[in-house]
Image (tube, rainbow, N blue to C red):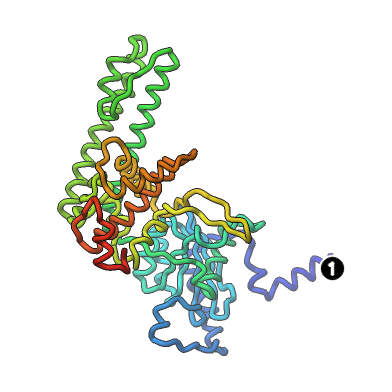
Amino acid sequence: MKKHSNSAKKCEPSIKCAQPRVSVRQDSREVMTELVAQLSKQLDGERLPVVELEDEGRSALCPNLNGLTVGVDLGDQWSNYCILGLSGETLSEGQIATRREEIAEFFQGMAISRVVIEVGTHSAWVREVIAGLGHEVLVANPRMMESSKRRRRKNDRIDARKLARLGRVDPKSLYPMQHRSSQVRADLLVLRARDALVASRTELINTVRALVKTMGGRLSSCSSVAFWKKAEMEIPTELRETLQPLLRMIATLNEEIKSYDQKIEKLASEKYRHTQLLRQVTGVGPITALAYVLTLETPLRFARSRDVGPYLGLVPKQEDSGDSQPQLGISKAGDQMLRKLLVGSAHYILGPFGPDTDLRRFGMKLCERGGKNAKKRAVVAVARKLAVLLHRLWVSGEIYVPLGYTSTASTAQPAAA
């Protein structure tokens, strides 16, 4: 009984002990009231010394020692937050609903702070809401940060606390990234919606083929557009009634995909006319060109064209340690849809219908080396070179020369080649 009474006395004056371990969903007004009260006490005392920076250093990332730092671990329904004071102490922890109104209300009454979030489904619009209220927002890249798998304890509350502390003392370790503008993201949704329909059509076609095989039949090869007509004639009579709904769904998807193709062509020709520079390369159509332009958003994002390859995950991963230098696959960083489109263009360039170009000759030389994965490596290498070439055409506005283009580009701007 004495131990119980002593522990109770110790917890009475401590603010940290009074907070439960489980995150509490508090009203945003209550949180702001408590926060203002704690800050007023803190501001009456001594402040941390202000570090004067030069004008060039103010734009760079630096520790946030003179203001609040808020770490927010975004969730689909609820998001955990952790607010650190001027001395790095935890002022408040809890949860807020991941809704536009709740996020705006929570940060509206807060003093100008540095807010750290992780990139994810909600990070783009959350950043716009918080930055619109005057706060500094850093979007952390978890792929570049130290892996959390080594930690023995991991939950949303700990993640929010970690984001806040890194954002306060070492923001560069977050590898902050910049989101695209809302208009570009809206146009990019057209491509992603079409990609989802194509994936659904492919799955339905494979399903029909597999079901016919289980009954001893087999459907001949054909294009995805012509599949539903050809399959309707080749499907065994006893299976037609069962598979007819799937064929009608495939036909409907063909019409919807065709509608998206028209929208993409209109966007590329009217709103993003510089995609014509990229479409000079045989094998790059309106979908690949528009996806490339929207994903990168601006060619000035990269100082050198060759930096686009690593950005899109088309370079090998590296995990060297001492004398160990294992050969690994590509990193697969960046946008998956664009990487898939570039690989598809590379397949066409190296395929039977690809014209004689520098890219094709480069890929065929890699194929001639032989080996188990020579063709796969050649396709990825051509896709990487294609990404570099497209950026070069976008920046310079040059006319593409299929053969001998390397020497032409190198004489224009050596730094961007």
Q: How many marks?
A: 1
Locate residue 375, reporting x and y percent. 42, 40
Residue 119 in view of the camera: yes
Q: Does residue 272 appear anywhere in the picture?
A: no
State the SS at label 1: helix
Residue positioned most to the left: 270
Q: Is residue 147 left or right of residue 182?
A: right
Against 104, residue 369 (above or below) is above
Q: Which residue is mark 1?
A: 2
What x and y, as percent, mark residue 356? 25, 44
Query: Image height check: is 221 above or below 306?
Result: above
Give, as a three-letter code, the residue at label 1. Answer: Lys
Residue visible at 26% across and 47% down?
357
Q: In the shown orientation, is residue 181 left or right of residue 275? A: right
* Depicted 60 relative to depicted 412: above or below: below
Query: Residue at the spot x=33%, y=44% of the render?
Result: 346
Residue farthest along the top direction in this orientation: 238
- Quick one: quadrant of the C terminus? bottom left
Q: Nearer the viewer, residue 227 or 149?
A: 227
